[in-house]
Every structure is written in structure tokens, then in C-alpha cells.
């Protein structure tokens, strides 16, 4: 009865109570890394960028929920990328309660533009004018390129700090004491743990920041020199970005949350090397993406279906699936066919030569109806031959042993009739050979020979023509030592592979960029996929991105296929660098594809920010073209495992973010403790007794 009564009172007062998150809780995140420099002005990656983004506002940021670029410190008009106007939010303040001004913004950009602090950002700021106009910041540049927006993700630093900063701090580690910040958190303290290499950094909530609701009161970072040291302290954390699978599932209270970055491995086919579309389609089809991911480790990798990391599949089933026929299109053959093809080629060459010989015109003789050739095939039983004298003083002319009685010395022309008529009998069925002789100073010399093959039956004439042309060349025999040596060499070839007429084996050079061990594994798997169809694949490692850059800048795209790592960062809709014609010669158009319709669509995405519908339409156009071209197959992107305490409520993990520095947004509305607010409006005396009676009846 007591239990029932207690349950009743609980349901009565708290059953419909509203849950109110308690604001004060501590996020404890452990990191295996050196202590960050906390410098927002230099090129930052990994954890340094992550922590800097907790301390400083930038003009723009990225919304991981909507997958869009959004305003942060300023409202910016991005309709024209060559003229961007930004207005600072009202009442935006530094942690020392002073207002954030346009001057702070201008000084931040000027110091980057005029120093070597951040080379990539400095290059974007070249030929860019930044000025104040009507209480707005104006960015003018001559390039309509979404990549220019990267400058607006630059953290803004207070002019007060920049006026007093030392050169050592400017180019290295920022001070952690009495600093000025602008985001929800400020640095509270930094500690070195006694008797260990572990360093601690504590961020405390900025009480003056009110732009977004955040329930985390303090963020405690611990930096460990190695994995072993972290494992000794693993029970104290409640968040860990487990990129190297250090913890796995060793702590039951931590829940695994997986996300990928806007990046992936992909195979590019060099269109200038693998020209035949059927072969390109066949090769890409045989690269089994699903099996590659399963082999790597299915739960650790996500299959990527296209370069925009969407669900639209650009794989294309090849029309021709017979590798032997495809290789024949490319003039490569199996050993068993090679001897026959070589002999056929030799015989064809001989036949071509014979045809040319038969088609050669005579030098001296013509006829009244057509030109006489060395071999003339005719069904005409009466042909008048004509000769025009070009030599000086020919005394006599003979055709075979017949002296032309009508010819007189100094005559310029002579005639001779080929006829089956009884009066002439100079032409008979089958082959007639005529030798033309000139007599000069009592010396008789042969000038040329020609043949007239005559048949009334045109079908028989055609057959005889084919036989005579074939007879003009000697058929191949084993007495041809050079050809026999080639045949003997063919016998030593491996039956599995394909060879051309010069007995060169068909091989593919597959370059891969070694970024991490998985790229070597993927390259090995692609090699295995293709070689199962008797096509040899040579793996060639490119050790660094720098080596690749040197290679392509020297126009040295000597690979047939290349396995590369594509990182799209904040602009996952912009594939300009990878497929535009202008990037083919010495940049990252690794497939050397050049198509006007593709260029137009890529430029449209690059030069203006589109709405979602327009962007998706252009993306589909591009994907359809790439599907036609068959030059690329995206493979995988590794999941990053973010381990978070199960007691943390309302964690909103996105399945894809541009950069690990955005992962703090997972905690935007998170909390651990909650209070319950009773709804007294529903607690009447009547309600109490009605529900009590209902409970007792049960």
C-alpha cells in the first residue's frame, strides 16, 4: 500500500513535470597531443584549431546540422563573392567587456596580410582590399571564388592584444594569462601535473556571452604525451575523439558516436592514358568498393558513392563485360591468338603490297577509255592502246615480238589494238602479258611490261583478280627466320596476360599517395580486383603530398590510375580543382578530363553560393557527366569515433562535418543534470481524487 501511495504521489506531482536542464556541468576531454600554441593567427590544424574555435569568434562559421555556411560574428552579404559586405552583430563584446569593433577585424586581417604568419591565408588576401564603409567591412577582390570565403573563417583578435603582442608570441605560442577572448569560453588556467608529463587546460564559461544557449560551465582538457599515459587516466574523462581507436569499447559508460569528415579516398583514371571508354568502364566496375570497405573493417569506414558524398550512385555497368574482346579493341591479345594475328598481319601487309602493285599505272601506255595499269582486269574485248613518244628519235616499237608497222621514226604517237576479233587475235581469255620494246640505233630495250586479264564472265574475272593479287606475293613460310624467331618468343609468354604485336604485355601503373596505411591497403585491394582479370597492375608509391605537387606541376602525369585523397573542407559542393579543364595540365584534374559542359557546371558552383535546390541540380549535372566519362570511383572515408559519456543528454552528432574543430557543436544543447518543474495548473482537488480512486480500483 505504501509503495502504491508513493507511486501515486510521484505520478501526481512529477508525471507531467517539465524537464529543465541544469546549466553547470564539466566537459572533460582527454587528448594525446602536445600542448596547443593557442595562436589563432597562424595555420592551425587538429586540436589547436579545435580549442582556438572555442575562444574566438570569426565572421562566418559552419552549421553542422544544416550543412551550410552561416553568420558568426557578422552578418555578411555573400551574393557577390567579389564584393562582400559584413556588418558586425550588435553588442558583441570581448571578455574584458569592451565592444568588438570593425577596427579589431581590420587589424586582424592586416597583420595576416602583411606578415608570413599564415601563408595560405596571405595568398587568399593578395590583391584584396579590406575597408570600412558606412559601419560595414567591405572585402573587394577580382576573383569570384567560394574558396575566398575561407578568409571569413579566420578568428578575430582584439586590436588591444595586437598592439601589445611580442614577436615571439605573434609567431609562436600565445600567452595564457590576462588574455582577451570573444567566444563562449575563456581560459581559466593551465597546470602541469606533478610527477608526470600531463598538462591541463581549463576553460570557463564566458558569463558575458549570450548568443547561444550552452549548459557546459567548464571544459577541462588534459594533454597526454602517449597512449599509455592516457589509458592510466581513462576513467576520469567523459569525451574522447578516438581517431586511433585507443580506447575502443573499454569503458562501458562511453557511447560510440561516429562521423566522417568532408574527405575520402578515390581512384582517378587518366583519360589520356586509358583512352578506350569500354576499358575505363570495365576497370572501374571491377573495383569492388563494398568488398574493399569490408576488408578494411566495415564498421570503421563509410562507402562513398560519389565525389559530392551524397547517395547518388555514379557507378555504371559496362556494356562490354568480356575482357578478351575489350583488350582486342585496344590491340592486345592472348598468347593463343597472337601467332594467328601476327601471321594475318604479315599476310595482310603482303596483300596490301600486292594490291598497290596491281594498281600501279603504266608509264607509257594509255587507252582511249581508261588508264592501263600494270594489272588491268577487264571484260572489254576491244581496247585501243595509245602511246605518246617522249624520247628522241625512236627507230622502231615492238609489243612482244610484233613490230608496229604503222610507226615511223619521229612519230609522236602510235596505236595498238587489243581485240579478240579474228582480224587481230591480240587478246585472249585469262592473262595476257605485253612487253613494250623501243629500238634505237639498232639496239632493242624493254621499257615496261603490263598485263591485261580478260574474262567475259565478270564473276570469274573477280575470282581471278583475287587469285592473281594473292599470287603476287610469296606466302609466309618457316624459312622467314625473323618471323620464326618472333613465333618462338610468343611460345614463351604467359598464357594469362595480354600482349600487343610487339609482344609488350599490357600493364597499368597505379600510383597511390601514402597518407596513412589504409591507402596502401586500398591500393593492394584494387590491384587484386583488376589482376583477377589478367591485367597486370604496378603499384607505385608517392610518399608525400609535396612529391605529388612537384610531379603534377612538372606536367608529369605518367600514371594510368592514381589513388588520391580528396578533402573538400567547408565547400563540399566545389569540385572545380578536380575536374575543370584549366586544372588538367599542371593541377589536380588528375583524370585530365576536358569537357565544356562540365566546366560550365563547375564554374557555376564555384563562382556563386547557390540555394540548396540550385546546388543539387548542378551537382546532378556534374555527376551524370562523370558517370558518362567513367574516370573516377570514390571509395571510402574513415569513421571518426567520438566516445561520449552516456549520461550526457541531448548530444547531437552529425554524420559528416568539414573539420574536427566543429565537433564541439555536438554539445550545443547537451546537459547532464536536470530539474523537473511541476505544472501546478493541472493539480486540482478533483483531479487528485479521481486518479486516487482509479488507482485503488486496480
Image (cartoon, grey):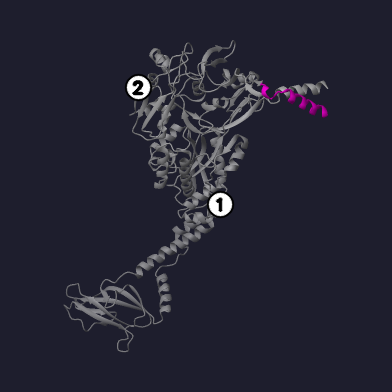
Quadrant assignment, res 172: top left
Quadrant where the N terminus is found in the figure: top right
Horizontal and vertical percent position of residue 274? 46, 48
| Mark 1 burial class by Cα count in 10 Å: few <14, some 14-19, many 20+ | few
Q: In this figure, which residue is indicated by the disc labeled 2?
A: 114
| Mark 2 burial class by Cα count in 10 Å: few <14, some 14-19, many 20+ | few
Horizontal and vertical percent position of residue 650? 61, 27
In front: 157, or 568? 157
* Residue 279 in sight here: yes
Horizontal and vertical percent position of residue 397? 23, 78
Q: Residue at 48% x, 60% y: name it.
A: 341
Residue at disc 2, secondary structure? loop
Q: Residue at 47% x, 34% y: name it.
A: 568
Please state if 289 lies on the left or on the right of 591 as rendered. Answer: right
The stretch of residues the image draws in magenta is 677-698
* Residue 220 in sight here: no
Amino acid at each position: 500500500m505504501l509503495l502504491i501511495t508513493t507511486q501515486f504521489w510521484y505520478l501526481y506531482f512529477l508525471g507531467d513535470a517539465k524537464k529543465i536542464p541544469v546549466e553547470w556541468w564539466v566537459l572533460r576531454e582527454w587528448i594525446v597531443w602536445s600542448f596547443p600554441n593557442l595562436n589563432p593567427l597562424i595555420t592551425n590544424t587538429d586540436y589547436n584549431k579545435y580549442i582556438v574555435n572555442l575562444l574566438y569568434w570569426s565572421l562566418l562559421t559552419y552549421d553542422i546540422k544544416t550543412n551550410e555556411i552561416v553568420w558568426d560574428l557578422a552578418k555578411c552579404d555573400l551574393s557577390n563573392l567579389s564584393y562582400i559586405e559584413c556588418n558586425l552583430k550588435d553588442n558583441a563584446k570581448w571578455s574584458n567587456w569592451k565592444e568588438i569593433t570593425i577596427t579589431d577585424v581590420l587589424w586582424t586581417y592586416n597583420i595576416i596580410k602583411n606578415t608570413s604568419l599564415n601563408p595560405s591565408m596571405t595568398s587568399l588576401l593578395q590583391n584584396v582590399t579590406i575597408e570600412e564603409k558606412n559601419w560595414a567591412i567591405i572585402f573587394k577582390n577580382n576573383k569570384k571564388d567560394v574558396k575566398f570565403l575561407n578568409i571569413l573563417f579566420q578568428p578575430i583578435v582584439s586590436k588591444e592584444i595586437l598592439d601589445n603582442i611580442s614577436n615571439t608570441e605573434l609567431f609562436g605560442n600565445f600567452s595564457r594569462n590576462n588574455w582577451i577572448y570573444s567566444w563562449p569560453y575563456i581560459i581559466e588556467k593551465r597546470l602541469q601535473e606533478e610527477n608526470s608529463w600531463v598538462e591541463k587546460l581549463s576553460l570557463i564559461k564566458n558569463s558575458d556571452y549570450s548568443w547561444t544557449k550552452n549548459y557546459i560551465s567548464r571544459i577541462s582538457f588534459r594533454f597526454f604525451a602517449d597512449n599509455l599515459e592516457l589509458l592510466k587516466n581513462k576513467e576520469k574523462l567523459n569525451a574522447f575523439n578516438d581517431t586511433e581507436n585507443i580506447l575502443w569499447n573499454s569503458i562501458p559508460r562511453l557511447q560510440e558516436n561516429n562521423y566522417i569528415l568532408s574527405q575520402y579516398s578515390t581512384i582517378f583514371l587518366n583519360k589520356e592514358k586509358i583512352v578506350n571508354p569500354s576499358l575505363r568502364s570495365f576497370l572501374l566496375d571491377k573495383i569492388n568498393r563494398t568488398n574493399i570497405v569490408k576488408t578494411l573493417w566495415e564498421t570503421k569506414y563509410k562507402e562513398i558513392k560519389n565525389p559530392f558524398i551524397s547517395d547518388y550512385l555514379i557507378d555504371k555497368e559496362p556494356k562490354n563485360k568480356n575482357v578478351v574482346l575489350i583488350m582486342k579493341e585496344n590491340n592486345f591479345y592472348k598468347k593463343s591468338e597472337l601467332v594467328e594475328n601476327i601471321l594475318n598481319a604479315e599476310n595482310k601487309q603482303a596483300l596490301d603490297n600486292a594490291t598497290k602493285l596491281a594498281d600501279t599505272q603504266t608509264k607509257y601506255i594509255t587507252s582511249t577509255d581508261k588508264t592501263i595499269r600494270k594489272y588491268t582486269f577487264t571484260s572489254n574485248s576491244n581496247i585501243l592502246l595509245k602511246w605518246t613518244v617522249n624520247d628522241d628519235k625512236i627507230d622502231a616499237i615492238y609489243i612482244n615480238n610484233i613490230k608496229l608497222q604503222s610507226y615511223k621514226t619521229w612519230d609522236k604517237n602510235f596505236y595498238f589494238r587489243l581485240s579478240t576479233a579474228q582480224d587481230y587475235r591480240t587478246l585472249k581469255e585469262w592473262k595476257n602479258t605485253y612487253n613494250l620494246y623501243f629500238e634505237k640505233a639498232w639496239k632493242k630495250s624493254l621499257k615496261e611490261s603490263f598485263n591485261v586479264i580478260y574474262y567475259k564472265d565478270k564473276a570469274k574475272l573477280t575470282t581471278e583478280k583475287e587469285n592473281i593479287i594473292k599470287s603476287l606475293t610469296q606466302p609466309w613460310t618457316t624459312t622467314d627466320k625473323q618471323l620464326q624467331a618472333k613465333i618462338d618468343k610468343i611460345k614463351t609468354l604467359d598464357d594469362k596476360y595480354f600482349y600487343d604485336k610487339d609482344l609488350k604485355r599490357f600493364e597499368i601503373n597505379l600510383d597511390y599517395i601514402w597518407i596513412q596505411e589504409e591507402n596502401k591497403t586500398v591500393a593492394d585491394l584494387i590491384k587484386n580486383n583488376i589482376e583477377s582479370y589478367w591485367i597486370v597492375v604496378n603499384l607505385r608509391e608517392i610518399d608525400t603530398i609535396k612529391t605529388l605537387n612537384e610531379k603534377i606541376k612538372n606536367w608529369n602525369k605518367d600514371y594510368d590510375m592514381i589513388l588520391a585523397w580528396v578533402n573538400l573542407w567547408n565547400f563540399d559542393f566545389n569540385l572545380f580543382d578536380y575536374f575543370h579543364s584549366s586544372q588538367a595540365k599542371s593541377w589536380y584534374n588528375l583524370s585530365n578530363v576536358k569537357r565544356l559542359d562540365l566546366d560550365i557546371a563547375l564554374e557555376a558552383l564555384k563562382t556563386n553560393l547557390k540555394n540548396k535546390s540550385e546546388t543539387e541540380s548542378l551537382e546532378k549535372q556534374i555527376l551524370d557527366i562523370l558517370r558518362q566519362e567513367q574516370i573516377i570511383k570514390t571509395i571510402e572515408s574513415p569513421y571518426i569515433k567520438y566516445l561520449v559519456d552516456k549520461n550526457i543528454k541531448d548530444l547531437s552528432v552529425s554524420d559528416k562535418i568539414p573539420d574536427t574543430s566543429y565537433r564541439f557543436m555536438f554539445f550545443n544543447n547537451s546537459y547532464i543534470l536536470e530539474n523537473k518543474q511541476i505544472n501546478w495548473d493541472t493539480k486540482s482537488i478533483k483531479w487528485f481524487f479521481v486518479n486516487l480512486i482509479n488507482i485503488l480500483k486496480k
